[in-house]
Amino acid sequence: MNDNSYIVIAIIFIFGILIVYYVFRFAGKKTIKIPETLLDAVESVLNRKVGFYNKLEKGDQEVFRQRVEYFLRTTKISAEKGTEITDEDRVLVAASATIPLFHFTHWAYENLDEVLVYPDYFTEKFSTTEKDRNVAGMVGSGVLNHKMILSLGALRAGFDKRPDGNTAIHEFVHLIDKADGAVDGIPEYLIHKELMEPWIKEMDQTIQEIRTDKSDIRDYAATNRAEFLAVVSEYFFKKPKLLQQDHPELYELLNEIYGGGK
């Protein structure tokens, strides 16, 4: 074969690799057709309801809106068990997903296909009628793998001005934590290796303080490391200044983990 033949073969080979990469990287995320009314609602809802968005510079706000729209176009949001959801609710789900990953431009929820919205709190067996229902959100497993369940009331409450927490952000943090294969409070895809040891040390120390009534962080954070990460992330994104004031070391570590320190 002459030199031109080798060049043609090389080009075909490279082109084939690119096609294979594209299929495996992007085929899992199908675009969802969404109504124009939903897209029209995005900016208004973010302005009225999402404090994180309102604190961003104008250019970053545009990026945030684009990320919210991307989530809406690639992740199904379904009303279940008689729930009635509005365009505002859908935007709040997408905003909850966008907030923790905002500083990571090449990270998306490859482990999520659908968010199921229930009308109220539910049980671990997904009942919304039993008296002992106390679950506000859940990352699915087994037959519900690649799905998340959120209580509509908890979703809306998370964007009220008064509550410290945000259930939807809490569950998306669990999903981020789960991406490396283990829900253990150590999100390996986000945390730098040099932060691993100080993060684990701070996490375990604060959990112990909570269990011995020496911390003002709510008790649920001491359930295990995974719940600690999810709860303190709620504080970090909902009331960062208060967290920085009361727990400066914890704040600085979270700021590094979520890319705010870059």
Image (cartoon, grey):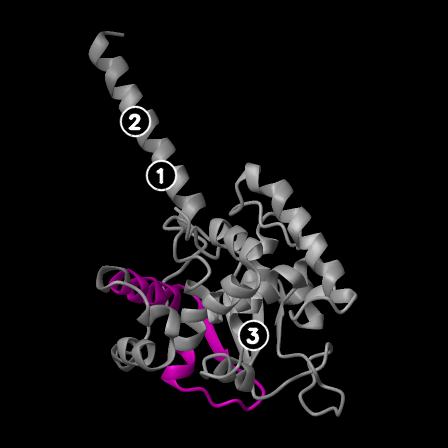
- Tell which residue pokes out farthest to the right in this image: 212
The secondary element bearing badge 2 is classed as helix
Q: Of helix, strand and loop, which one carries label 1? A: helix
Q: CA distance from mark 3 to mark 1?
A: 39 Å
Camera-near label (3 vs 1) is: 3
At which x and y percent is residue 141?
66, 63
Q: Which residues are magenta?
A: 61-90
Q: Report the side of 121 relative to 234 (left or right).
A: right
Three-letter residue code for mark 2: Ile
Packing grade of label 1 (10 A; few <14, some 14-19, many >=20) is: few
Residue at position x 34%, y 25% from top? 13
Residue at which label 1 appears: 19
- Decide which of 124, 33 is in the foreground and name it: 124
Q: N-terminal of the two: label 1 or label 2? A: 2
| Number of residues whose C-alpha sits closer than 10 Å to that of mark 2, classed few (under 14), some (14–19) or many (20 or more) | few
The residue sitting at 51% across, 50% down in the picture is 257
Q: Which residue is mark 3?
A: 167
Task: Name the quadrant of the N terminus.
Answer: top left
Badge 3 marks a residue whose secondary structure is helix
Q: Is residue 72 on the magenta stretch?
A: yes
Q: Please, which residue is most extreme toward the left here?
A: 4
- Whether 124 is among the magenta residues is no
Along the horizontal axis of the image, is 32 left or right of 40? Answer: right
**Apparent side of residue 240 relative to residue 54 in the rendered image (left or right):** right
Three-letter code for the amino acid on which mark 3 is drawn = Thr
Residue beneath label 2, please? 12
- Which residue sits at x=77%, y=65%? 211
* Residue 230 quadrant: bottom right
Residue 71 at least partly seen:
yes
Furthest residue to the top?
2
Q: Earlier in the sequence, mark 2 or mark 3?
A: 2
